[in-house]
Image (cartoon, rainbow, N blue to C red):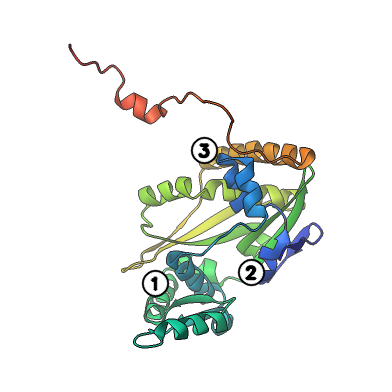
């Protein structure tokens, strides 16, 4: 159930369940303006969402790396249910562990191996272990829109933030594509904008990318000026739409009537200048 978000400010160590209940615009909802305002409204209203196995595994890694002392309170290891009555036993176990991240028990070894990989790399280890506010939530007002964000780790005195991402491929070229596909540049820009509204200058936004399959490669990335320029542009355009929707109370869907489609630029370029002789 949604509840009013707190007043603008910085709130460290907020449980995910509490943060999720705050009635405010977050980055996941904001990105849905690429579909339509109606899609944004659906997310804000608590539209159906079910975490995938990959998401759950990523949350378990996050807890192991950044909140090891609370791991048992945050993560439940799902046993294998087989034989007669297994369906009911599984449902009962799931209900008993509601509110926790749930992963198959045999994936815990992978979670721990990722922890060792991160510990073995000086840059990864330093970012993961340096003192900072974990699960740091920020709330701010942006042109009449109450917004919120949740930074994995915020080094307040240094003006730096860390986001831990699990991924299929953490190599520079492939992860750059993930930045585009999953909106990590706009996320960084959104958080930078929010902290600025609270009088805090974010000087560095680090992404610790770690693969979710063996050998669990890990790397630390920052986004260059062009990535951040595009992210800021996206956020500005989306926030303009958000402000208009909040002011009007209208969250329209796709355009009505018949819309003429044009080919995407990348596809048109592939066929540029090509003709078939008849």
Q: Is residue 256 above or below residue 195?
A: above
Question: Residue 216 falls in which quadrant of the image?
Answer: bottom left
> How far apart in space, not on screen, are marks 1 and 2 (Cα)?
26 Å
Instruction: Count neighbours of disc 2 (C-alpha within 10 A) and say few if under 14, some if 14 to 19, many if 20 or more.
Output: few
Helix, strand or loop status at disc 1 = helix
Horizontal side, residue 160 vs residue 80: left or right: right
Compared to 161, does 31 lie above or below?
above
Location of residue 143 by image quarter: top right
Task: Please tell me which residue is depicted at 59% across the width and 50% down the height of the picture.
Answer: 188
Residue 271 relative to residue 210: left or right: left
Counting residues from the N terminus, which is met first, the one under dot 1 or under dot 2?
Answer: 2
From this viewpoint, is residue 174 visible?
yes
In this view, the residue in front, 107 or 68, is: 107
* Residue bearing mark 3: 226
Left or right: 98 in relation to 117: right
> In percent of the image, x 41 and y 46: which residue is there?
177
Residue found at the very far top of the displayed protein: 278
Q: Position of residue 217 (x, y in %)?
A: 36, 64
Q: Is residue 203 shown to the viewer in this render?
A: no
Question: Can you name the residue that lies furthest to the right here?
Answer: 7
103 over 43 or under it: above or below = below
**Disc 2 secondary structure class:** helix
Whole-number angstrom distance, CA of label 1 to CA of label 3 = 30 Å
Quadrant of the image for the C terminus?
Answer: top left
Residue underneath mark 1: 117
Q: Is 6 or 51 nearer to us in this picture?
A: 51
101, 155: nearer the viewer: 101
- Image marks 1 and 2: residues in contact by CB distance under 8 Å: no
Nearest-to-viewer mark from 3 and 2: 2
Q: Give how far across and how far down residue 17 sits, in percent.
A: 65, 70
Per the image, the residue denoted by label 2 is 16
């Amino acid at each position: 159930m949604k509840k009013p978000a707190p007043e603008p400010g910085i709130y460290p160590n907020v449980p995910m369940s509490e943060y999720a209940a705050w009635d405010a615009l977050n980055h996941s909802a904001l990105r849905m303006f690429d579909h339509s305002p109606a899609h944004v409204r659906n997310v804000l209203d608590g539209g159906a969402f079910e975490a995938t196995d990959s998401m759950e595994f990523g949350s378990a890694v996050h807890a192991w790396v950044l909140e090891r002392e609370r791991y048992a309170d945050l993560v439940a290891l799902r046993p294998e249910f087989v034989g007669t009555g297994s369906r009911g036993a599984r449902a009962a176990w799931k209900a008993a562990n509601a509110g926790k991240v749930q992963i198959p028990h045999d994936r815990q070894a992978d979670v721990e191996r990722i922890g060792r990989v991160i510990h073995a790399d000086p840059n990864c280890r330093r970012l993961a272990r340096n003192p900072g506010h974990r699960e740091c939530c920020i709330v701010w007002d942006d042109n009449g829109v109450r917004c919120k964000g949740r930074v994995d780790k915020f080094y307040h005195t240094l003006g730096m933030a860390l986001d831990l991402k699990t991924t299929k491929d953490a190599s520079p070229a492939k992860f750059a594509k993930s930045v585009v596909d999953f909106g990590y540049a706009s996320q960084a820009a959104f958080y930078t904008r929010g902290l600025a509204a609270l009088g805090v200058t974010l000087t560095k936004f680090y992404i610790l990318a770690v693969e979710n399959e063996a050998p669990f490669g890990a790397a630390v990335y920052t986004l260059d000026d062009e990535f951040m320029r595009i992210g800021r542009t996206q956020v500005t355009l989306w926030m303009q739409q958000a402000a208009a929707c909040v002011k009007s109370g209208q969250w329209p869907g796709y355009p009505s009537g018949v819309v003429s489609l044009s080919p995407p630029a990348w596809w048109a370029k592939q066929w540029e200048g090509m003709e078939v002789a008849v």
